[in-house]
Amino acid sequence: MLHYLAGILPCDSGVLRVNGNPVRPDSADWQNGISFVPDDGGTITLLTVAEQLILKGLLAGLERKEAAKRADAVIDLLHLGSHTAVRACDLSSGMRKRLGLALGVVQNAGYYLFDEPYGSVDMQGAAAFARILRTLRARRRTILLANYSPDFPYNSCDKIWAIGNGLVEEIAGGTDYAGLSVGSQDDNAAKEPELTWIDP
């Protein structure tokens, strides 16, 4: 489903509607308003962490100075500082996942789509990403995550749907679900990331 919403895969039937209005997932207007992070992070094998983040900013239409500034910020947020000059092919699976999450938030989008964002991420990375999600939510961004782990913090979600046998069914509101929290109390109580480029 996320690949369809991201305009990567075609859909055989049905219509995507946003606020009641039909949207073509492959249209330029929709593509410019979303940020999609696939399960593999969407990283480029031969580019370093810093190069990929700056490239993502440039492709989003940023000036190089601003792209580099945002790259530095997300590197700090996701604790990638010791890996900035490391190519993606030389990163562990957990660090590649962190890089993918960093790529997802380096742009200012209205909709953020994350496919299995907590897979392979250690507790430090998971806690950092949870803080980023809270910031995006506070700034009224729409976040859609696909998840298959029972250890996901479901109680942080507004809505939870289950997909099976071709059907999508709402199963709970996030506050009604006995989910698990990610990270220690100290991690979750840490200062929320600024993400100054994502306007309230």
Image (tube, helix red, strand yellow):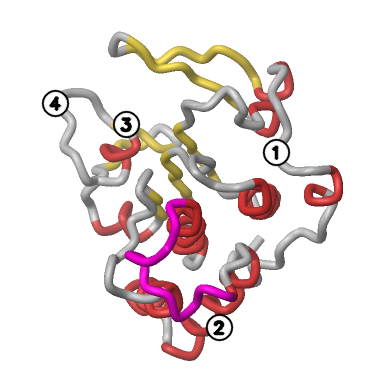
SS at circle 3:
loop
Q: Where is residue 50 in the image (x, y as percent from the top left)?
A: 45, 78
Numbered disc 4: secondary structure: loop
- The residue wearing badge 4 is 12
Kind of residue indicated by mark 1: Val
Q: Do the residues labelled 3 and 4 touch (CB within 8 Å)?
A: no
Residue to which mark 1 is pinned: 182
Pick the front one: 118 or 131: 118
**Residue sitting farthest toward the top:** 165
In the displayed orientation, state which residue is furthest to the bottom: 65
Q: Look at label 3 and name its amino acid.
A: Met
Name the N-terminal-most of marks 3 and 4.
3
Q: How far apart are marks 1 and 3 (CA)?
A: 25 Å
Marks 1 and 2 sit apart, C-alpha to C-alpha, by: 28 Å
- Disc 1 to disc 3: CB gap under 8 Å: no
Sequence-first tag of 1 and 4:
4
